[in-house]
Amino acid sequence: MIRIEDYQPQWAPDFYRLNTAWLKAYFYVEPIDEQVLGQPEAFILRDGGSIWFLLKDDRVVGTAAFRRLPSGEVELTKMAVDESQRGLGYGALLLEEGLKRAQNMGLQELTLYSSTVLKNAIHLYRKYGFVEVDLEAGVYGRADIKMRKYFTAHLSENRRRELIESYRTAASRLIHTVRNMPEEALVWRSSELAWSIQDIAQHLVDSEMHGYLRLRFALAEPGYTISPYDQDRWVALGSPAAVDANLRLFDELRQRNAQVLESLHPSQWENTWTHPDRGVLTVDQWLMNYESHTHLGQINRIFTAWKKQTGQA
């Protein structure tokens, strides 16, 4: 029988065992891991976090946790399944339990940090609605991706202001990231079908132009059904513009949209637009979607892969 239970002290060794097993298999155990995994009551539960376990016939085969961050965010963390039990859907059960708990807590959003080496985990997170957002430095040595899931169609006024500012300044972060990258790194592709950094810069312009129109439709013709576009075919057209030129255009579009967002009457945030695949979305959801759409993490991963292939890592 499969069941999920909250933390109990007798399962603390299982929490340590399950998590150190996958860390050793893919990476290494960092000092902070030893602290948190060895003393979960002090480092997770005492600060308002929670831990849950998946039991199969009374044996612990999986675990996951919520940790409250200094920023006020809640992090989904320390999710692990016994190696002998993988491929049975237990990771999805643990994640579903976490999402249910987040909603019961009234969270507007949930954050996680991971590594793109863990392809199955990343696929699972995306399947359940997590999207990549900009990764700040110095969180975990092994983390190269940060993801977030929203549980609301409406933002608080303070959170809205934060996202508008992040949305507005995204281009400057991108320009700072690529400014010292050599031209050969900007056009390099890891495979024939993969995007280069130059392709990403063009895609950001394509996406932001569509975003500009979608926002205008939501405000001028609420409920309007937009036409999706094939982003790969648009990128395949190529771009005669240099990466920095495309990023400057991306910045101009974002500055214009940010001005529009800051001028909105409170009632206009309730306006909607309709996506054929995703349904009815609010202007708040437009902001949630586009604020996180920078590909900054992907650009850094491409550059790291280029350096490794060319012996410059």
Image: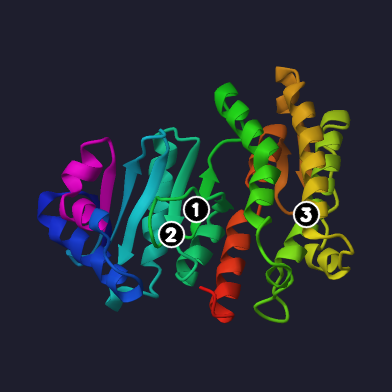
- In the rendered image, which quarter contains the N terminus? bottom left
Looking at the rendering, the stretch of residues picked out in magenta corresponds to 33-53
Residue 244: numbered disc: 3
Give yes or no for contact between labels 1 and 2 (Cβ–Cβ under 8 Å).
yes
**Residue at label 1?**
146
225 relative position to 46: left or right: right
At x 60%, y 67%, the residue is 303
Q: Which of the marked residues, 3 or 2, is nearer the chain's N terminus?
A: 2
Q: Relative to 41, does residue 21 appear above or below in the rendering?
A: below
Whole-percent x, y for residue 150 in the image = 54, 42
Q: CA distance from mark 1 to mark 3?
A: 25 Å
Image quadrant of residue 272? Answer: top right
State the CA–CA distance, disc 1 to disc 2. Answer: 8 Å
Left or right of 98? Residue 214 is right
Provide residue 215's location: percent of width, then percent of height: 80, 37
Q: What whole-number distance in Å separates the C-alpha atoms at marks 3 and 2?
A: 27 Å
Tell me how the rendering is colored. rainbow
In the drawing, does residue 313 fall left or right of residue 201?
left
| Residue underneath mark 2 | 143
Amino acid marked by disc 2 = Ala
Q: Is residue 293 visible?
A: no
Please tell me which residue is depicted at 88% across the width and 32% down the height of the picture: 221
Task: Give how far across and how far down residue 31 sits, in percent.
Answer: 23, 57
Residue 189: x and y in percent read 69, 76
